[in-house]
Image (tube, rainbow, N blue to C red):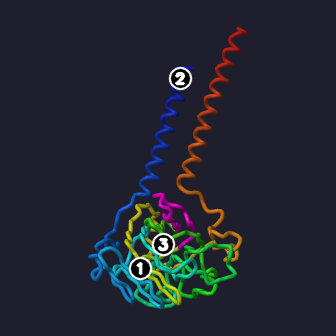
C-alpha cells in the first residue's frame, strides 16, 4: 500500500505540473506588446509622419475630431504604415457627442483594416466595396422595420471588394454579428477592442464605466491578410454629431503558428469568412452574435481540470476499495 501511495503522490505532482504548463501557455498566448508605428496617441506627434487625415478631420492636443456637430461632413485618419502582424488587438478610445436629441443625431464612426486608405466615400466617410475588415459604430437607425435591435449598434463586416453596404438596412445583409451599446453623450470614457488571432475575430466594448470588457462579437473562420492599413472615419448627413478619436493602440499578440501557417504568404490571402450563418439569423438573434462558437482557451482549461480531478478521485476510490479487499482476504487465512 505504501508503494501505491507513493505512486499516487507522484501522479498528483505530475498532474499539477501539467496544469501549470497549460496556465503558462494561456498566459503567454495572450501577451501583448504595443506597436507604436501603428498607434495614435496624445499629443498625436505621429500625425504627418505615420498618420494621414482628410476631409473635415481636426487634430488637437486632446482629440482627433473626424466630424464636427455639423451636417454633411466626412473625415478620416489613416495609418501610413502597412501592418504585417498575423495576430493583433486594437484598442480604440472614442467619444460621440452632440446637441441632437434622442434619434436626432448621426451617423457614426467606422474602424477599418483595409487594403486601400484615404478613399472618401458613402460608408461612414469611406469607400464602398472595400477589401478588408470594418467595424461600424452606427448611431442612427435607417431601417424602420428592424425594430428587433436598439441603436447605437456596433457591427462587423469582412468584404472581398464585391459587397456593397446597404444603408437602407443598416448594413444588415453583410454584417457578421453585432450588439447594441450606449456610446453617445456619456460622462465617462468609452472604449472598443478588436482582436484578430488564429482566424478568430472578437470585438469587445467598455462603455458602461465599469472598467471591464463586455463581449460584443465573436466569430471564427475569419481570414484577413497582412499588409493592410488601419484607419478610422466618420460621417454626418442631415443629422450630425461630434465624432472624436482619443486614441488607437495596436498590440501584437504572441501566438504560435504551425510551420504551414508560417510559410504561407499572408499578403496573398483574400478577406473572407467561412461557416457564415445567413443574415436572416440575425433577426432571431438581436445581438447578431454567432451561435455554437468554439470553446475558448479558459473553457478548454476548465474542462481539462475537471477531467484530471475526476481521474484523481477515481484513483483514490479504487485504492480504498483495493485495500479493503486485501484486508478481507487476509481474514480467510
Horizontal placement of 111 versus 309: left or right?
left
Q: Which of pointers 2 and 1 indicates the residue nearer the eye? A: 1
Q: Quadrant of the N terminus?
A: top right
Local SS, label 2: helix
Residue 262 visible, this angle: no
**Nearer to us in this view, 61 or 275:** 61
Q: Position of residue 290 (x, y in %)?
A: 63, 67
Magenta stretch bounds: 200-222
Tell me the residue that label 1 is attached to.
231
Whether 15 is drawn above or below 102: the answer is above
Residue at x-position 45% and y-position 87%: 70
Q: CA distance from mark 2 to mark 1?
A: 65 Å
Q: Do the residues under discs 3 and 1 have CB atoms within 8 angstroms?
A: no
Tell me the residue that label 3 is attached to.
185
Q: Quadrant of residue 279?
A: bottom right
Residue 95 visible, this angle: yes
Q: CA distance from mark 2 to mark 3?
A: 69 Å
Earlier sequence position, callout 2 versus callout 1:
2
Amino acid at each position: 500500500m505504501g508503494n501505491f501511495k507513493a505512486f499516487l503522490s507522484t501522479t498528483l505532482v505530475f498532474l499539477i505540473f501539467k496544469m501549470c504548463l497549460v496556465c503558462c501557455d494561456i498566459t503567454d498566448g495572450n501577451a501583448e506588446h504595443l506597436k507604436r508605428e501603428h498607434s495614435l496617441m496624445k499629443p498625436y506627434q505621429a500625425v504627418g509622419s505615420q498618420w494621414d487625415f482628410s476631409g473635415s478631420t481636426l487634430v488637437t492636443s486632446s482629440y482627433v475630431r473626424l466630424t464636427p456637430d455639423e451636417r454633411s461632413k466626412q473625415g478620416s485618419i489613416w495609418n501610413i504604415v502597412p501592418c504585417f502582424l498575423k495576430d493583433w488587438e486594437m484598442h480604440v478610445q472614442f467619444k460621440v457627442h452632440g446637441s441632437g436629441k434622442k434619434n436626432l443625431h448621426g451617423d457614426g464612426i467606422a474602424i477599418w483594416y483595409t487594403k486601400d486608405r484615404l478613399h472618401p466615400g458613402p460608408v461612414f466617410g469611406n469607400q464602398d466595396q472595400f477589401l478588408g475588415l470594418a467595424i461600424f459604430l452606427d448611431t442612427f437607425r435607417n431601417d424602420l422595420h428592424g425594430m428587433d435591435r436598439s441603436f447605437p449598434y456596433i457591427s462587423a463586416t469582412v468584404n472581398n471588394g464585391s459587397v456593397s453596404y446597404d444603408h437602407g438596412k443598416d448594413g444588415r445583409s453583410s454584417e457578421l454579428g453585432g450588439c447594441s451599446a450606449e456610446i453617445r453623450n456619456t460622462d465617462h470614457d468609452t472604449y472598443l477592442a478588436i482582436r484578430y488571432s488564429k482566424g478568430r475575430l472578437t470585438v469587445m466594448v467598455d462603455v458602461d464605466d465599469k472598467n471591464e470588457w463586455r463581449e460584443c462579437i465573436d466569430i471564427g473562420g475569419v481570414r484577413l491578410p497582412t499588409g493592410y492599413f488601419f484607419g478610422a472615419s466618420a460621417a454626418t448627413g442631415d443629422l450630425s454629431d461630434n465624432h472624436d478619436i482619443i486614441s488607437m493602440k495596436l498590440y501584437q499578440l504572441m501566438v504560435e503558428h504551425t510551420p504551414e501557417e508560417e510559410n504561407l504568404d499572408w499578403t496573398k490571402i483574400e478577406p473572407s469568412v467561412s461557416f457564415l450563418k445567413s443574415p436572416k439569423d440575425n433577426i432571431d438573434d438581436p445581438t447578431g452574435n454567432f451561435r455554437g462558437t468554439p470553446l475558448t482557451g479558459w473553457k478548454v482549461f476548465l474542462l481539462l481540470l475537471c477531467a484530471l480531478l475526476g481521474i484523481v478521485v477515481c484513483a483514490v476510490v479504487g485504492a480504498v476499495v483495493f485495500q479493503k479487499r486485501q484486508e478481507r482476504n487476509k481474514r480467510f487465512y
